[in-house]
Image: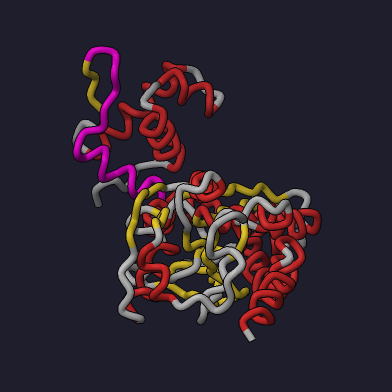
Amino acid sequence: MPMRNVTLRQMRVFAAVARSRSFTRAARELHLTQPAISQQIKLLETEVGMPLLEHLGRQIHLTAAGDELLRYASQVTELLREAGESLSAMRGLKRGVLKLGAVSTAKYFAPSLLSEFAPKYPEVTIRFTVGNREEIIHQLASNEIDLVIMGRPPRELVTVAEPFAKHPLVIIAAPNHPLANKRRIPLQRLSSENFIIREAGSGTRASMEHVFKEHGVQIRASMEVSSNETIKQAVMAGMGISFISIHTVALELAAGKLTILNVAGLPLLRDWFVIHLRDKHLSPITAAFRSFLLENGTAIIRKTVEESELVRRIASAQR
């Protein structure tokens, strides 16, 4: 059989070189000498029967065979990690690595979730990644992260998506905006306002477009940005209004720097989901965090952003 003599050490060495594109850095990472790294790569190439790396000047590049083998080397490494965590759990240990991803809007409350969870597992390493929706979906698909927090499950992947908290979306404006003190503003009235919107592919933007399309209202987008922080600053500066998650604006509302417009039919209530690939074997620590979110997520998020009081005030004003 081809590759029957390939060792785990060779695969680990190859993966380190492929990631760092450097024999020297791989040697430092694995606590080996550079000649030892070179020898393991040569043995692996002999067993594979094809070159895996090529040197162009001082740069190391993967060949087509190397690029293909790296996918499997990464899977082998991941399986070994999961096996180690499962065995640790059987021994009663609480070690492991939690690889969590979240869309950018969730970064306002995700640290509070982690701070409640982490003390129960002091020996766990947490790798937390924040990105836009497309980045997080890509990382989930490529097995770089195990769990994802996002507001709308990806249709392009086969996943298990479980809601764990409510996600209100509102329209914000500067406190001196002409509509700031109006009640039950018709959605159609906003068609003449300048909107500052998230980039294409954003979950917040998709929700916004759905709401306005459903009511046959066209919006006038004066600015498109990829950051909630930039949106908030632009709205505070009086450049327009925006459709945004209430979880991103709690501090600015409390400080009186922003206000929520009292628009009929809003806030729009969506869900936050914890998501993983359907065929993914969850490590013990990953499964523990998933259960923690489902049991405690709503209470922690409400406490963090004072969401329940804000939503109550909006609903009361609309009556």
Quadrant of residue 37 in the image? top left
> Colour scheme in the image?
secondary structure
Viewer-proximal residue, 261 or 278?
261
Residue at image point 70% right, 50% down: 124
Query: Horizontal placement of 162 versus 307: left or right?
Result: left
Residue 256 located left or right of residue 74: right
The x, y position of residue 182, in whole percent, is: 58, 71
Q: Hey, which quadrant is residue 259 in on the image?
A: bottom right
Q: Main secondary structure of the magenta part?
A: helix
Residue in the picture at 47% in, 63% down: 243
Point out the image quarter for the C terminus.
bottom right
Q: Residue furthest bottom?
A: 319
Residue under the image location 26 percent in, 45 percent down:
68
Judge by depth and name the residue closer to the eye, 291 or 199.
Answer: 199
Q: Residue at x 37, y 74 (%)?
A: 212
Total labels: the figure holds: 0
Q: Nearer the viewer, residue 91 or 270?
A: 270
Using residue 11 as the reference point, say whether residue 52 is left or right of it.
left
| The stretch drawn in magenta includes residue 113 | no
> Does 66 lie within the magenta span?
yes
Stretch of the chain drawn in magenta:
57-75
* Position of residue 249 in the picture relative to residue 278 (left or right): right
